[in-house]
Image (cartoon, rainbow, N blue to C red):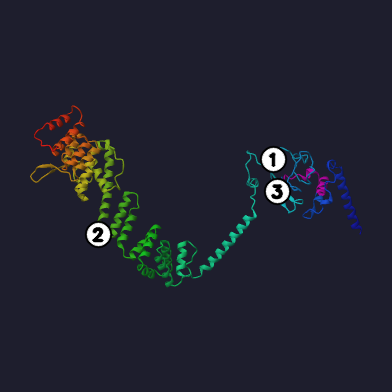
Amino acid sequence: MAGKDQARMAAAAFTADDEDYWEESAVSSSKKNMFDDEEEGFTVLGVSENKAARLSSALRSTVGADALFADDDNDDITWETSSNISNSSSHGSITSDYRSARYTPPTNRSGSLSTSSSSRSTAATVTLGTSQDNSLSVQFNKPKMTRSEPMSLEDAIVDVPAKQVTATEVSKLETEIQFLRRQVQLGERARWTSLPVKETIKRIILGQPYSLEAYKSLQDKLALLDAAIKMHDGDAITITVLFLKKTVRKSIFQQELIKRPVAINHLIHFLWCHYDLDELEELYKMLRRMEDVFVLKYKQALAPSKAAGRAQSIAAVVRSFQHDSSLAPDSTLLLEQCTLLQRQLQIEEEDKKIAAGGKHPVFKDHPPKAQLPLTPLTTTLYYCSFYHYNESDSSLSSPLSIKRDFQMSDKQYTWSALNALAKLHRWKEIEALLTSKNWFGGTKMKACIGFEKVVEILSKQKAPVDILSKYLAYIEDPNERLALAAKHKCHRIVVDTLIQLKDRAALEDYRLKTPDYSLERQYLITALNNSQVKWKN
């Protein structure tokens, strides 16, 4: 009993001292009995707002403000009864609209509880309770970082306002989660459920969930493949044929695949697109399609970017198929390509030495702008005609030796040589190129590509009018000769052609197109005054 009496007396003394403290404080002058017990029912963790304020006052009087706020913590704990908070700049002042017990770190060593009106802080507030009058708000005030200070991750997160999630959005998310759960459950069930073959193919085509693991027998797998082929859907055919390939023996797969050419084509396309060339080659050999194997190996041989490596790869392909008589023509073509590559490498190596000497006039005036290896045969002939036209046919770079060794036609040789010589303006060599000898030792002009093409090539290289007129005269068709002569302003050829056509009216009209006091105008007038010509008009 004595112990209980002493406890009661201590409690009464504490209460009396506490009330005296608040009666004597600066707060009492503005508003007395601020923490009245009429709000005793509002508690936080079993402690009422009134008692929390009294405990705070007792701590201040007992421990001291300096010791109480020695920690450099910046968190504020606020019990408030409204949604707004007003901070006063005076020490310990509290407005009449709010009841609060605020723990605020001091701004100086004296332990002052004043808050500066110029200080800026961000607050993250968590409100507990549903009552508007009795709500608990725990507010953490964090000072904003200035530009000179780096912002920490915690401060960056605090500064971002929390997104308010509405009840409608929560309900929508819950509905979506339930739907996805049902889909997963249906997928797990369907994985081991054998659906009808048509239904599975339909799901594949429509992009719906499907499973092929339930089809165990060979009959069901072949039925899947046949149904996909019947639906003419490439994706479904590829999926089912790969499933069959993966789940049956190789011999059975090959036996059944041969019966279905459509499935073979789709599988070949799939292997080619996925660069599974080894398996594609094995498939070709299984189907005994050696020509396709040859083409596949040739495409692989073209992979090296350098001419030397490509020549070696092509030579290896030729050696691999040299005993196959059915591929003899193709092997011959590949052998010629390999020979051309090796010859191009030799010619370019020698030409680099000649160009480095600086004595060859053509290499000096027209240096090569591109590499010779890996170019077509006609380009190689043009190159050799441009730089090595007058060399003997025993030389590797001679145009005649290239024509002979690769069995090029006269048209191919004439076209390439004529373009090269016209580029260099070698008119005498062009004339010699187009001059042929007959059996009796005579000579005549002959162009296997036609003199129309000859005139076209020479005009592109800006040949003189007299050179063009020489070859225009060899065009047999007068109308075509007249059109080309008028196009290139070869007036004498136009006059001769109109005289041949006996067209006086056209000749009279063309007189206005000839230059005044020119030889062509005099030649035209002389033709008009010739009485021996029997004009048609």
Q: Residue 357: image x %, image y %?
A: 27, 37
The residue pinned by badge 1 equals 120
Q: Regarding mark 3 in the picture, which secondary structure is present there?
A: strand
Looking at the picture, does residue 519 appear above or below residue 18? above
Query: Amino acid type of disc 2?
Result: Ala
Is residue 423 magenta-colored? no
Please identify, in this view, whether the residue under mark 3 or under mark 2 is nearer the observer: 3
Q: Residue at x 27, y 42 (%)?
A: 351
The residue pinned by badge 3 equals 125
Q: Residue 249: image x %, image y %?
A: 40, 70
Left or right of 492 in this view: 342? right
In the picture, which quadrant includes the C terminus?
Answer: top left
Q: Residue at x 9, y 46 (%)?
A: 439
Q: Does residue 360 show up?
A: no
The residue pinned by badge 2 equals 328
Left or right of 464 in this view: 168? right
Please identify, in this view, whether the residue under mark 2 or under mark 1 is nearer the observer: 1
Tell me where residue 46 sits by quadrant.
Answer: bottom right
Earlier along the polypeptide chain: callout 2 or callout 1?
1
CA gap, disc 3 to disc 2?
88 Å
Q: In this orientation, which residue lies closer to the viewer: 522 or 175?
A: 522
Characterize the local packing of mark 3: few (<14), some (14-19) or many (20 or more) Cα atoms within 10 angstroms: some
Q: In this orientation, which residue lies closer to the viewer: 70 or 404?
A: 404
- Please, which residue is most extreme toward the left here? 440
Left or right of 236 in this view: 51? right
User: Over which residues does the magenta segment extend?
Assistant: 53-73
Query: Amino acid type of disc 3?
Result: Thr
